[in-house]
Amino acid sequence: MTDTTADRTSTTRNPAAPGAARTVASAVPAALVARLAKGVTASADAEQVHTTAPLTGERLATLPLSGPADVAAAYERARRAQQTWAALPVRRRGAVLLRFHDLLLKRQDEVLDLIQAETGKARLHAFEEVLASAMAARHYGRKASGYLRDRRRSGAVPGLTHAIEARRPKGVIGQISPWNYPLELSVGDALPAFVAGNAVVNKPDTQTALTALWARELLIEAGLPADLWQIVIGDGPVVGPLVVDQADYVSFTGSTRTGREVAQKAAARLVGASLELGGKNALLVLADADLDKAAEGAVRACFSSAGQLCISIERLFVHRSVADAFLARFAARTAALRLGGGLAYGADMGSLVSDRQLEVVTRHVEDAVKAGATVLAGGQARPELGPLFFEPTILDGVTPEMSVCAEETFGPVVSIYRFDTEAEAVAAANSTSYGLNSSVWTKDLRRGRAVAAQLRTGTVNVNEAYAAAYGSVASPMGGMGDSGLGRRHGSEGILRYTEAQTVATQKLLPIGPSMGMTDEKFAALFTAGLKAMKAFGLK
């Protein structure tokens, strides 16, 4: 039989999730938008920008645009507020985070509606943002005092030099946050900055600004001074550089291309930056994996938030001996995912966020199929469900010349590759300039950790998709290579927002010739002292 493109496409359509009675318009009324818009730092006669709801294509919000003078005003207010805030004890600042934690969990339905309305994701995936933000609030609310406390260090002269390492706030953090996880990647990254004594000037993506504005309102209700968190809105190429140019430190989450530009601008001012960028993440199914669990985990790994997640999986490597059995399970589960945009739990996957994302996903799939790839599941847009729905898609037979092989899709598309040895799988997984997240599936946990140690990614999940590592908020999360610089979470996630200061107090004798001692005697004394310190194991 002659192979045709039609033969290489899936004929099974994903089912639609049950509809929900509540609409975007009823969940996000004009009065709510108007109230939240007051939180934008913008002039009274500012130009307006309109956003649309991905689920329906209808207008969602009208928001004021911030200009250069507005960004400058935001920094001025933030700097004034930061000085008073930094003078408070860390525990007082941490108490605000703990109150925010409780308020967020209590009023989560409000922000779940906003996240769904602005991103189009399923409600369960919107809840992941509530979960992550609450975990960060609890962790830093309780652990900040320990992270930031003064630490005694060995002095130059034992007994005579008293040295401490202190942590001082940077000042005002310039934060640029993306549209795909608008709660977690705005407030989740801002919380450790606040508790460390900083103010924040945040430029969220305009499409998802309502979510960040809601989080700001809730933090103010929890006790955060209103001027401490400034939000400015505008096109990234226009407002973004203004935010970077006045910041004492920059926190950026977005594309690798833009991340390079942010890094260059920050470096020109000798200002630090943390950058969480793109990824082409890999999942490895080893020969001994539990195939049912691996297939279920792969569905979460590839299609949560319609694949619009920096740490989601786009490349799946499966041992040849179990490939057929695994793919049958994986394809069946993928084809059964319910697509929908109701503002309620029940849909397994929502929509893409924009025409641009739909264009990239469609192009990657169509180009791959034309070049010989086979669609095992999905592969088509679903406009009858909404303007930006695209089915969760599995591609087999992907080759290097196809765009989907190496370019980040950032959508519900995964490519399948087979391997014969673990060394081959590790080499293939590492054959990318990115290094953000990876996943390994095996029944042998020691073996899984051994494979993980060979993968060049900032996080590795063994027998989980991404949530195990990301949710371990006491541990650092970030990328290697083109996936970025710096880390969120853990000690690195808060200490990045501080300057280390050493305060050394000298007692009794100076570090230099004294009391008539000659230079030669001083040198001889310290030479003997250094030898003694080494002999006695001093560090």
Image (cartoon, rainbow, N blue to C red):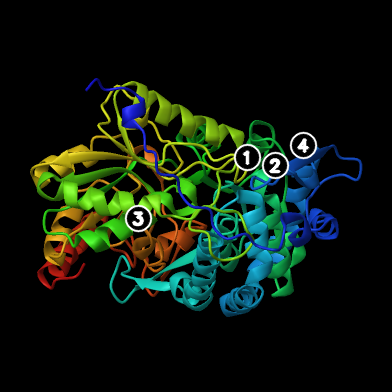
Specify the amino acid type for callout 3.
Arg
- Report the front residue among 320 and 207: 320
Q: Residue 176's x, y, as percent? A: 59, 46
Between circles 3 and 4, the one closer to the viewer is 3
Q: Are marks 2 and 1 in contact (CB under 8 Å)?
A: yes
Circle 1 Cα neighbour tier, 10 Å, few/some/many (<14 / 14–19 / ≥20): many
* Residue hosting label 1: 387
Name the residue beneath numbered marker 4: 68
Disc 3 marks which residue? 333
Q: Name which of mark 3 and mark 4 comes first in the sequence.
A: 4
- Circle nearer the N terminus (3, 1): 3
Image-quadrant location for residue 80: bottom right
Q: Is residue 315 left or right of residue 34?
A: left
Label whose residue precedes the other's in the sequence (2 or 4): 2
**Crowd rating for badge 2 (residues with CA inside 10 Å; few <14, some 14–19, many 20+):** few
Residue lying farthest to the front in this orientation: 1
- Residue at disc 2, secondary structure: loop
Disc 4 or 1, which lies upstream in sequence?
4
Mark sitting earlier along the chain (2/3): 2
Residue in the picture at 36% in, 33% down:
9
Do callouts 3 and 1 mark residues in contact (Cβ within 8 Å)?
no
Q: Amino acid at mark 4?
A: Pro
Mark 4 or mark 1, whichever is nearer to me: 1
Q: CA distance from mark 2 to mark 1?
A: 6 Å
Marks 4 and 1, how far apart at CA: 35 Å
Label 3 element class: helix
- Residue labelled with disc 2: 57
517 vs 220, left or right, is left
Where disc 4 sits, the SS reads helix
